[in-house]
Image (cartoon, rainbow, N blue to C red):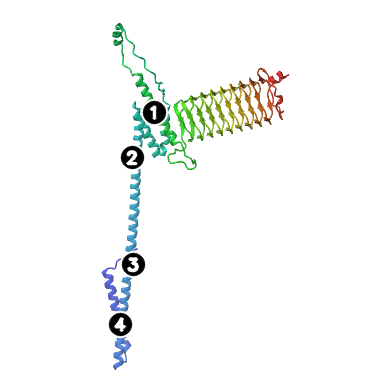
Amino acid sequence: MRLRELSPKTMWLTAVVIVVLTAGAVVVLWWPATAGLNGAELVSARLDALKVGLSVAVGSGGVVVLYLSWRRQHSTEADLDNRERALAHQQEVHADTMARQDHAARATEHDAAERRLNELYLKAVEQLGSPHAPVRHGGLYALERVAQDNPHQRQTVVNVICAYLRNLYVSPPEIQTPRSPSVRRPLLRSTLATRYVPTPSRDESREALLREREVRLTAQRILQLHLRPGPDPDHPQSGFWHEIHLDLSGATLIKFSLAGCAVATATFAEATFNDVALFDKAVFIGSAQFGGATFNGYARFNDATFNGETNFGRANFKSYAAFRNAAFTGVVGFGQARFSSLVGFQGADFAGRANFARATFINYAGFGGATFSGHAGFQAVTFTDTASFDEATFSDNAEFGEATFIGDARFEETSFNGGAVFGRVKFDESAVFDGATFDGGAWFHGATQRGYTFDPGYISSPNETLPVSEEDAREDT
């Protein structure tokens, strides 16, 4: 608080009071105190009276001076405090103003960035619809830049690229030697000339398809590049796009590769893989859907990891298929799948339920060393060539009911820790169970070998006998 200012009246009143006090002291000491004194004593006493009066005056003045100095100091401190308060207030106002301006600037910058992003995104999408292949290439690279610079847009960009790959695609025809032009008859020349309609030549159409093929390969390379975490998955490379969901259902893919890649989920239902399909060491964090897919070239899933539900039902493998050391954590289905060439599941690990019901293996089928921790269903499977389950392990029930082994069936050193069901199985060639163990019981009711009743007598007697249906019991009787 600031002290009230001293008015001139107060100052004069203070001076008068000091004078009066001084005069009063002198008067009192001058006469009453010197009464009865003469000579030198009187002079000395009156001099003392003057000294006392002057002392009173000086002391009073000093008190006033001290008071004024104190007021001045207090006033100075009050001014400094007020200035500090004012400065602090100004700083608060300035900080608040700067914060508002900074917020407005950031909002403006964010809006501008969003507008630029939207413009770039829309322009890139528009370029993908161009009839010119170089423009479509530019659109893909623009989308890649958008996704790399803006992580929250990566899934959207991937969705656009996948949508482009899902578009109808026709493979370019093989190069053919054009026929030599034949000589036209004079009578037909004019007739053909009047009916001629200009159309793109075969070479021009093939060139357009080839350019589209290159655009699609570029789209696939972008996905492969940014879905690969690198040699250390715990510390992925800077260009890796995390937790991406792929939807390429019905797409036509050319030399497609997700080798070493990691995706959240992947859908390839009814997709067509032309040439090779590489998924070695790929990691599917969630579900992987390949139902109804067609693999025209060889397909490799060696060392791949499937952590969610996996479906290859009705898939058609027209060439070599390899699932060596693949790990299936969840339920996996190969029901009604068709393997036209060699297929290898050696060392594969099926932690959940594995279903191969009604699948068809035209060529060699290798399951050597595979591990089936859950239920393994091979009901009504057809093995046209050799089927090898040597050293495989079935921890749960293994059902081969009504399966057909046209080639050799090999189960050497195979471990059946659960029930082994081979009811009504047809062995057209040799069925080898040397060294196989049946800890959960084995059932070969109705099984035949080369048209005769299969005799499993040389197989070690199981510890249990699996239950049979009433119909089977009547047939046994």
Q: Is mark 3 on a helix, strand or loop?
A: helix
Residue 286 in percent (x, y) is at: 51, 34
Q: In the image, is residue 213 above or below residue 83?
A: above
Q: What element carries label 1?
A: helix
The answer to whether any part of residue 3 appears in the image is no
Q: Is mark 4 on a helix, strand or loop?
A: helix
Q: Label 1: which residue?
A: 214
Q: Label 3: which residue?
A: 74
Looking at the rendered structure, the kind of residue marked 1 is Glu
Query: Tags 1 and 2 in contact by the CB under 8 Å rule?
Result: no
Looking at the rendered structure, the kind of residue marked 4 is Gly
* Quarter that holds the N terminus: bottom left
Q: In which quarter of the image is residue 176?
A: top left
Neighbour tally class for label 2: few under 14, some 14-19, many 20 plus, Cα within 10 Å = few
> Whole-Å distance between the Cαs marked 2 and 3?
55 Å
* Quarter that holds the C terminus: top right
Task: Give the mark toward the camera: 4 or 2.
Answer: 2
Task: Give the mark toward the camera: 1 or 2.
Answer: 1
Of mark 3 and mark 1, the one earlier in the sequence is 3
Task: Give the mark toward the camera: 3 or 1.
Answer: 1
Looking at the rendered structure, the kind of residue marked 2 is Ala
Q: Label 2: which residue?
A: 112
Q: What element carries label 2?
A: helix
> Whole-Å distance between the Cαs marked 3 and 4?
31 Å
Query: Tags 4 and 2 in contact by the CB under 8 Å rule?
Result: no
Closer to the camera in the image, 461 or 183:
183
Neighbour tally class for label 3: few under 14, some 14-19, many 20 plus, Cα within 10 Å = some
Task: Give the mark toward the camera: 2 or 3.
Answer: 2
Using residue 112 as the reference point, say whether residue 390 is left or right of it.
right
